[in-house]
Image (tube, grey):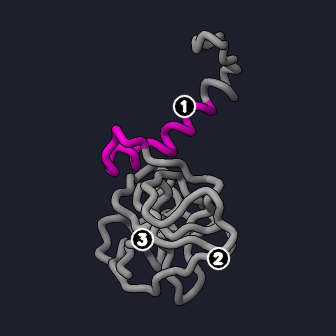
Amino acid sequence: MKAVGYRKSLPIEDQDSLIDFETAKPEPKGRDIRVAVKAISANPVDYKVRKRATPPEGEVKILGYDAAGVVDAVGPDVTLFKPGDEVFYAGSILRQGTNSEFHLVDERIVGNKPKSLSFAQAAALPLTSITAWELLFDRLQCRARASIRTRC
């Protein structure tokens, strides 16, 4: 499968700062789903990771956290999704990123893509939505009320 990543933290102007490469299609295990990625979004975390985290010698780190796509295959313990489901999510910094044709993600951090959104629109939501949630409910300590209004 095709992917975009980096081998070494280089200035973005360097022609080798991001590379296109081929790698094996990942196989889902446990609660992983394999997503055929249809759209991704770029976030500041991509820049920060590329700048500060050098992959192990001989390896390529695939960037990307936000994605939207179609479930292609599921691991043996998956109960929440099936092939053909449209999904969106923010992946894990501990795994390879979403800037690839196929991506493995734990089903427990995935949501059904809203039907009213395109894949590109859905891919733009995960990390920005998490950031907004953390600001409102963790930092400002807003409390949701039954009437849907919040109190900060």
Q: Which residues are magenta?
A: 114-134
Q: Would residue 54 be seen by someone viewing this image from the given angle?
A: yes
Whichever of labels 1 and 3 marks the residue nearer the N terminus, that label is 3
Q: Disc 2 vs disc 3: which is toward the camera?
A: 2
Viewer-proximal residue among 142 and 105: 105
Viewer-proximal residue among 140 and 123: 123
Viewer-proximal residue among 18 and 66: 66
State whether residue 62 is above or below residue 151.
below
Location of residue 118 in the rendering, given as x and y in whole percent from the top left corner: 31, 46
Location of residue 121 in the rendering, given as x and y in whole percent from the top left corner: 34, 44
Q: Amino acid at mark 3?
A: Leu
Decide: few, some or many residues near mark 3? Use Cα within 10 Å; few <14, some 14-19, many ≥20.
some
Are dots 1 and 2 in contact, CB under 8 Å? no
Q: Disc 1 vs disc 3: which is toward the camera?
A: 1
Location of residue 58 in the rendering, given as x and y in whole percent from the top left corner: 53, 89
Are dots 1 and 3 in contact, CB under 8 Å? no
Determine which of the numbered discs, if any, sits on residue 10 in the image.
3
Q: Which residue is mark 1?
A: 132
Q: Which residue is mark 2?
A: 29
- Left or right: residue 120 versus residue 127 is left
Image-quadrant location for residue 57: bottom right
